Amino acid sequence: MMTKASGQNTAISDLLRRVALPAAALVMLTIPGAFAQEAARPPAGGELTSEEEIKQFCTNIADPARDQRYLLQKQELEKLRTDVDSRIAEMQKRKEEYQDWLKRRDDFLKQAEAGLTDIYKKMKPDAAATQLQEMRIEVAAAVIMRLNPTQSSLILNEMDPKKAAVIANIIASASDPNTSKDPS
């Protein structure tokens, strides 16, 4: 026979079995929801997950990175501007050099037109060569350049070979528009 105490224990055990299973199921169903809520809010103590850390890091460095990119672009543009300015200066220098060359050539031709050409046209080649060797080399070259090729070659043939070569170089340079004072 069962005692009253043992009967109560059995009744309580039966009750616990009937209630425990649904209670355990209820507890089990609420646990995933609890974990989901914990994942949605940052943990206590201010710690962030790695994805959130990455997002926060990217957000924090976006402005400084943009500023650095702009600074690098500005430096590159300043470098390009300096390069363009130096090229413009070089072009201006070349233009001035060309204008100077053109002026010297025009002056050179004017000296020859001053009547000297007619005088040397009528002279014998050996006499003209002797006199032209003693003149300023630029004037002699201008005169010889204005004579016809036959007379010029006869006069140059009668001259000292070194002076004749210098005069021939001057004549060649004067007729070449690509000639520059600067050999570079």
Image: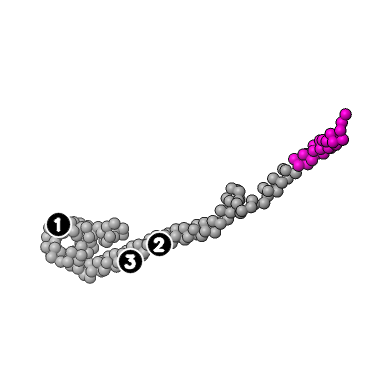
Give the residue at x 19% y 60%.
167
Q: Main secondary structure of the magenta part?
A: helix
Q: Residue 12 is drawn in which quadrant?
A: top right
The amino acid on which the numbered mark 3 sits, given as a three-letter code, is Glu
Quadrant position of the C terminus in the picture: bottom left
Dots 2, 3 in contact, CB < 8 A: no
Counting residues from the start of the chain, the first of labels 2 and 1 encountered is: 2
Q: CA distance from mark 2 to mark 3?
A: 21 Å
Q: Which label sits on residue 82?
A: 2
Q: Secondary structure at mark 1?
A: helix
Look at the image and say whether residue 48 sits in the magenta stretch: no
Residue denoted by label 3: 96
Q: CA distance from mark 2 to mark 1?
A: 46 Å
Decide which of 92, 3 is in the foreground and name it: 3
The local crowd at label 2, few if under 14, some if 14 to 19, many if 20 or more residues have their Cα within 10 Å, is few
Residue denoted by label 1: 162
Q: Nearer the viewer, mark 1 or mark 3?
A: 3
The amino acid on which the numbered mark 1 sits, given as a three-letter code, is Lys
Q: Residue 19 is drawn in which quadrant?
A: top right
Q: Is residue 17 left or right of residue 151?
A: right
Look at the image and say whether residue 21 sits in the magenta stretch: yes
Dots 1, 3 in contact, CB < 8 A: no
- What are the residue bounds of the magenta stretch? 1-29
Q: Is residue 94 left or right of residue 26?
A: left
Decide which of 92, 164 is in the foreground and name it: 92
Counting residues from the start of the chain, the first of labels 2 and 3 encountered is: 2
**x then y, percent, for residue 168:** 20, 57
**x then y, percent, for residue 122:** 17, 64
Task: Tell me if I can see residue 11 in this picture.
Answer: no
Give the residue at x 31% y 59%.
177
